[in-house]
Amino acid sequence: MSGMHRDRIRIQRIAQAASAALCNGYVLGFQKGRIYTGKSKAVCVPVLNCYSCPGALGACPVGSLQTALGGIERKFPFYALGLLMLFGIMLGRLACGMLCPFGLAQDLLHKIPVPKFTVPKKADRPARRVKYVILLAAVLLLPAFAVTKTGVRPPYFCKYICPAGTLTGGIPHLLANPALRQAAGSLFGWKLAVLLLILAASTVIHRPFCRYLCPLGAFYSAFNRFSFYQMRIDREKCIGCQKCEASCPMAVEVTKDINSPECIRCGKCKSVCPAQAISSGFRTGKK
Amino acid sequence: MKTDRKLFLLRICVLAAALLFIGIGLLRQEQMEVFKKAVKICLECIGIG
């Protein structure tokens, strides 16, 4: 492993750990099985981070979007959507690669030395569209329109899919609170199964949740091609060795489409490039 | 050159739209709805139902 590559991993891990600590810094919450109730909870964080995590200092943007859409007044969610657009236009999917705590969990699990699996392109390409379906159906349409028998519109993504909520919210609360343990039923069993499946898959496939299921990644991916933060390849310096493509954890065709919607801006391509043809940073595009 | 200018305009327009949305949301006190939801344990989110 080259020095530059080691440095990149170190920077990524420090950024991810700092983000996880900043988003979930209320340590007392884990001890007491309570959640933080300070004013910062009115602000959405740029990553998938359950607001019911005992340590959460901010609000989950995906949960906030569903709450606004499914609320009694059924308002257009200007605030949550505006924040998501702001994060998207500034960073694209940089938040996925460098800031997301659940991304960090998947990255660490992928370090476990077990045989790795490359998903064939025929299955990989259509499977990546699932996250857009989840965004449209479970985050936007169902919370806005699908009323249950009890007359409420639940946050369908949070309720039935979100593994981050189970990992950082459900499990710590159940461990700390016997009453919640008593109340846990088949829904918790289902969510635990989803979480375990994703965690198990993360050991053999790099970031399966980000690739195939994450609605927040799907939203940010719409901004990847024109966000202020951009990846750039210098065609004159590129020697066509394809090391960037071989190393990309998201299987992006780096030389053809460096700002692909699938790129999470982890910078691995940049660090393995022997010709230093790849760069990244904030660009206005103004000439 | 033209593409760069178009990109610049697109970025600025989306950024302005994002800030406008946030402003409208703040005027409508939507941050308080986010706050109210975020300071209670969401039983659905943690899988209790």
Image (cartoon, rainbow, N blue to C red):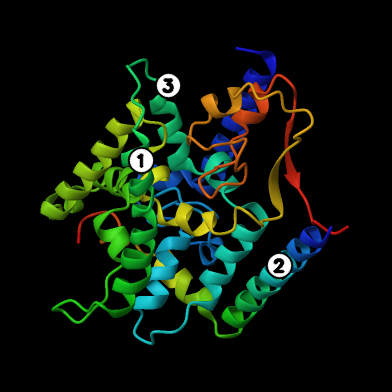
Asked whether, in this view, residue B47 is left or right of residue A26, the answer is left
The chain holding disc 2 is B
Q: Position of residue A80 (x, y in %)?
A: 52, 70
Q: Which quadrant of the view contains residue A171?
A: top left
Q: Which residue is mark 1?
A: A124
Q: Which residue is mark 2?
A: B10
User: How many residues crowd mark 1 within 10 Å: few (<14), some (14–19), many (20+)?
Assistant: some
Have a look at marks 2 and 3 and say if they share a chain: no
Asked whether, in this view, residue B30 is left or right of residue A202, the answer is right
> Is A191 situated above or below A123?
below
The chain holding disc 3 is A
Q: Position of residue A260 (x, y in %)?
A: 56, 47
Under tag 1, what secondary structure? Answer: helix
Under tag 2, what secondary structure? Answer: helix
Alpha carbon distance from label 2 to label 3: 39 Å
Q: Which residue is mark 3?
A: A111
Q: What residue is at 71 percent from the left and 23 percent from the top? A: A239
Closer to the camera in the image, B47 or A208: A208
At label 2, which amino acid type do we have? Leu
Q: What residue is at 11 percent from the left and 52 percent from the top? A: A186
